[in-house]
Image (cartoon, helix red, strand yellow):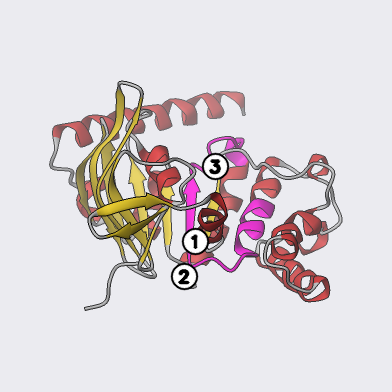
Amino acid sequence: MSQPLVHAAQVRKSYGSNEVLKGIDIDVEAGEVVCLLGPSGSGKTTFLRCINQLEDIQAGRIWVDGDLMGYRQKGARLHRLKDKEIAAQRREIGMVFQRFNLFPHMTAIDNVMEAPVKVQGRPRAEVRTQAQELLDTVGLADKAHAYPNQLSGGQQQRVAIARALAMQPKLMLFDEPTSALDPELVGEVLEVMRDLAQQGMTMIVVTHEMAFARDVADRVIFMDGGVVVEQGSPKDVINNPQHARTKDFLKRLRAEHERVAEAAADLV
């Protein structure tokens, strides 16, 4: 049997005395879209950051495509990789953050080109062609020479997605990619993510966008208090949750969405 693309086993992460991840076991198959749901502080973002070693872990192991992330195992002992080796592992993992983190002094196309040229050492002309194609893919072909401050939040986030894709990753991580956007801009970013899912990109998405999780995810995982509480198909977890914590979270989330919708309607 083939191994999952992502295999996390008994992952624990603490900040001082605060244990944020309490033994996480999660597998993600190649081509699968997994949405992580849960309240703030449940450990979702921390888990994403541990996958690509933006955070180290205190216990457990994470493999991506068979590579043990952040460590080399010799016998029963783990040895931390050098920073340069960890950076090499990260190159095959794209990550899109809540904030866009674009270089403000660079145009959209230069932001997309930066890592393939500087990190991978690829020819600039080749990378420029690819970058233009990626901007076209995210619907921004006409914004190639615009600077971030000339773009809307949704457009900046789409440039950030194109930038992550420019490294030709085998895995994409999304950390609440629409949470910093005005409501009317959310749809354009989610549409790009839907297209990526249809193309077979392996994706782990931290999100509160229930419609996206229901329509696009192959599997939904609900986390709370640093543990996996419940997981299954979107139909099972979102429409028919079994655990009281999941039910309470979804009830509160729906109430918040209704409140926001009512407030928006009052402004019309």
Residue type at mark 3: give it. Answer: Thr
Quarter of the image containing the C terminus? top right
Q: Secondary structure at mark 1?
A: helix
Q: Say whether residue 234 is visible.
A: no
Q: Is residue 120 above or below residue 224?
A: below
Element marked by disc 3: loop
Q: Position of residue 155 (x, y in %)?
A: 70, 49
The residue sitting at 75% across, 71% down in the picture is 127
Mark 2 lies on residue: 198
What is the x, y in percent for residue 5? 35, 66
Q: Residues within 10 Å of mark 2 (few under 14, many from 20)?
A: few
The outermost residue toward the bottom is 1
Q: How many marks?
A: 3
How many angstroms separate mark 3 from mark 2 (CA)?
Answer: 19 Å
Q: Which residue is disc 1 drawn over?
A: 194
- Which three-letter amino acid code belongs to the residue tagged 2? Gln
- Residue 102, given in percent of the width and then of the height, sits at 72, 45
Q: Earlier in the sequence, mark 3 or mark 1?
A: 3
CA gap between label 3 and label 1 equals: 13 Å
The segment highlighted magenta reads 158-184
Q: Is residue 114 visible?
A: yes
Q: Which residue is mark 3?
A: 178
- Horizontal arrangement in the rendering, residue 153 relative to residue 39 (left or right): right
Point out residue 213 in the picture as x, y percentages from the top left corner.
Answer: 37, 51
Queried whether the magenta region covers residue 213, the answer comes back as: no
